[in-house]
């Protein structure tokens, strides 16, 4: 999973949530952050091409922070959260 975070407003966009847009436009904006600093664009490939197009990331003021999270890391984080909920102790701890 690829997460795109805006330095300006703190918005986090997940790249896999954005896909091929409807319509025949050569370029189209398919996502942006709350402040408008980051725009995710779809650029249609010219045929004959093996792929349908590419996703691009544009910014106005500051660079986006792009983080790649593997499936194993997500699984590990989820398990740690489940274990911390199970191991909560009531009362005083020394």
Image: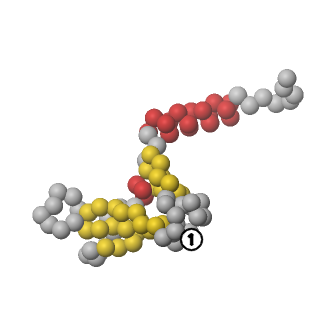
83 to the left or right of 31: right
Up the image or down, 60 lies above or below 87; here it is below
Inspect this view and state whether residue 92 appears.
Answer: yes
User: Residue at the spot x=49%, y=59% of the render?
Assistant: 64
Quadrant in the rendering for residue 26: bottom left
Up the image or down, 92 lies above or below 12; here it is above
Q: How would you rate the neighbour count of disc 1 (Cα within 10 Å): few for under 14, some for 14-19, many for 20 or more?
A: few
Q: Which residue is mark 1?
A: 35
The x and y percentages for residue 7 are 56, 60
The x and y percentages for residue 31 are 44, 67
Inspect this view and state whether residue 13 appears.
Answer: no
Viewer-side residue, 47 vs 67: 67
User: Residue at the spot x=74%, y=31% of the render?
Assistant: 88
Quadrant in the rendering for residue 79: top right
User: Residue at the spot x=23%, y=62% of the render?
Assistant: 52
Residue farthest along the top direction in this orientation:
94
User: Residue at the spot x=44%, y=50% of the render?
Assistant: 2
Residue farthest along the right direction in this orientation:
92
Quadrant in the rendering for residue 47: bottom left
The x and y percentages for residue 61 are 52, 68
Up the image or down, 34 lies above or below 91; here it is below
Asked which secondary structure carries label 1, the reply is loop
49 to the left or right of 30: left
> Image quadrant for the C terminus?
top right
79 to the left or right of 94: left
41 to the left or right of 78: left
Viewer-side residue, 4 vs 14: 4
Up the image or down, 13 lies above or below 86; here it is below
């Amino acid at each position: 999973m690829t997460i795109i975070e805006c330095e300006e407003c703190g918005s986090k966009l997940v790249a896999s949530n954005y896909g091929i847009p409807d319509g025949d436009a050569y370029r189209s904006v398919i996502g942006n952050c709350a402040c408008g600093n980051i725009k995710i664009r779809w650029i249609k490939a010219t045929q004959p091409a093996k792929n349908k197009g590419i996703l691009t990331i544009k910014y106005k003021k500051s660079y986006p922070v792009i983080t790649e999270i593997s499936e194993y890391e997500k699984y590990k984080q989820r398990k740690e959260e489940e274990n911390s909920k199970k191991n909560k102790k009531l009362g005083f701890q020394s």
